[in-house]
Image (cartoon, grey):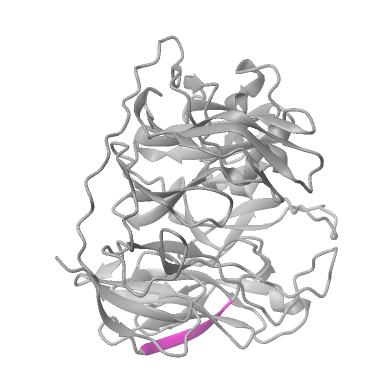
Amino acid sequence: MAVVCLLAACTSGSDPAPSDSGATTPVGTSSASPNPGPSAAVEPVGPLTELWRTRGLTPVSQVAVVAGMPVTYVSAGRRLYLVGLDPKSGKETWRVEASVSLSTGRASVRSIKDQVLALVPAHPGAKDGKGAQATVALIDPTDGTVTTGPLAAVYHGLPRPCEDDKALICVETKAPKQPADVEDVVTVAHRVDPATLAVGPALPGDSAAYVQTMGLRGDGETRIIRSQGGQTLWTFDITTLAKDLNLGNGWSGEYYPATRTVVLTVTRLFGKKSVDLAGRGVVVALSVDTGAVLWKASDLSTMCGEHTVDETTTVVLACRSTGSITWGSFSGPFVFKGVRERVVGLDVRTGRVIWESPQVTHPNASTESFPELLTIRDLEDRGRLSVGASYKGAPPTRVLDPKDGTMRELAKGEAVWDLTYPTFDLFYPMPMPWNPAEPGNVGGRVLAVVHGNGSPAKVWPWYLPTRDVVDGVGFIAVDDAVVALRETT
């Protein structure tokens, strides 16, 4: 998801919801009556069987299966490596030193045409600015053979298949003519030829938005532009939705390939010391081909968590809130008053409400950090999601099925997967203007096993949190190992 936001506008990326008032209002139509999701039956409990686990590895990404081989990023001795594992034994079969250059994104194993796609250091082991120079590379997942591109450069994003053309590779560098000491780096996207790994010229626009939302980018305070190949395809002015909207207050865009629809949330900044949650966001769906408004909603936000949108997704997850948050300064404290929230499932084609989750009520209380409200996160379990009703970092407390809105509380003693974001040090420093000697700490993603109260669990959850399997076996990165697990029927 491409997100541009300010602290007060985005509430750390959460916005959920209550009241039983009408939900979204598709343009030119009336809204449908929401269908509260029924309580789900208790999920079956069938413990996972552990087949093997690695020793001495420190994963900093989740495992991906590429051409039948489990591959993950690991850190060791202030260096970053990609490692291939034997799927039957967990034995390390190859190790290649990798790079994140100056990317601040989370480490994630990417592939194209059964090859691992990554950056490798142009100057392995360099402890100065040269350490950030890297080349785009393809790695054979069976034996670790590396093929590198011709251009060594400093990159601000990791290479990946382009969202608008999966046969091509996209990667980012810093925009030209930008001051060297700027804090908020503006980047530009490049196409990379998969055959030669040659990096093409810069594409227009902010690369994060460009790649993630089919060429969508903000232009000035109120215009959103879709461009491709240097050509502007269409322009959309957000003030046609509401006069007080401004992109500087925060916005996000998410592309739904199944319907060629882009769903945007634009947030409001309500004064300096309060946020009225009921009208904090406007959601609009646009045709990616024409920019035409398909539907809109003035009481919802999609900026309430992290979840996967793939080629089959037709349900938009949004959050509706009432109540307020007030504060004396941006350092807090932040006070809740009358905050009630729901998660809402919308038909991406029409914006009509398919289901609404049961209401969650927050106590009137204060917190020292800006609060995260309802937070939706992937469980990577056949599309299910976790919903936490507390502050940032809180464990999941409910399990939600986005297809029909069924939600259940975690059973007593039930274990679930939770996300953690480890960091690691690199030899070369990240050139941050506020601390030029600061090491490059880059978060990946691994999993932890917890109970609903956040305490560590000694039993495995009942489901595999990955669809990357080999002969029914899934491979999970935890903080100190990769574990092979088979789901019990």
Q: Position of residue 250 (x, y in %)?
A: 67, 37
Tell me what residue is drawn at x 62 percent, y 39 percent: 230
Tell me what residue is drawn at x 46 percent, y 37 percent: 360
Classify 321 as above or below 46. Answer: above
Which of the 4 image quarters holds residue 326?
top right
Which region shows up in magenta? 92-98
Whether residue 269 is visible: yes
Q: Position of residue 85 (x, y in %)?
A: 36, 83
Residue 94 among magenta residues: yes
Q: Name the residue nearer the viewer: 310 or 146.
A: 310
In the image, taking residue 403 as reference, residue 456 lies left or right, namely: right
Q: Main secondary structure of the magenta part?
A: strand
Q: Residue furthest left?
A: 489
Classify 41 as above or below 220. Answer: below
In the image, taking residue 179 as reference, residue 300 lies left or right, namely: left
Q: Name the residue nearer the viewer: 378 or 451.
A: 451
Q: Position of residue 372 (x, y in %)?
A: 59, 46
Classify 372 as above or below 414. Answer: above
Q: Position of residue 41 (x, y in %)?
A: 21, 46
Whether residue 209 is visible: no
Residue 373 among magenta residues: no
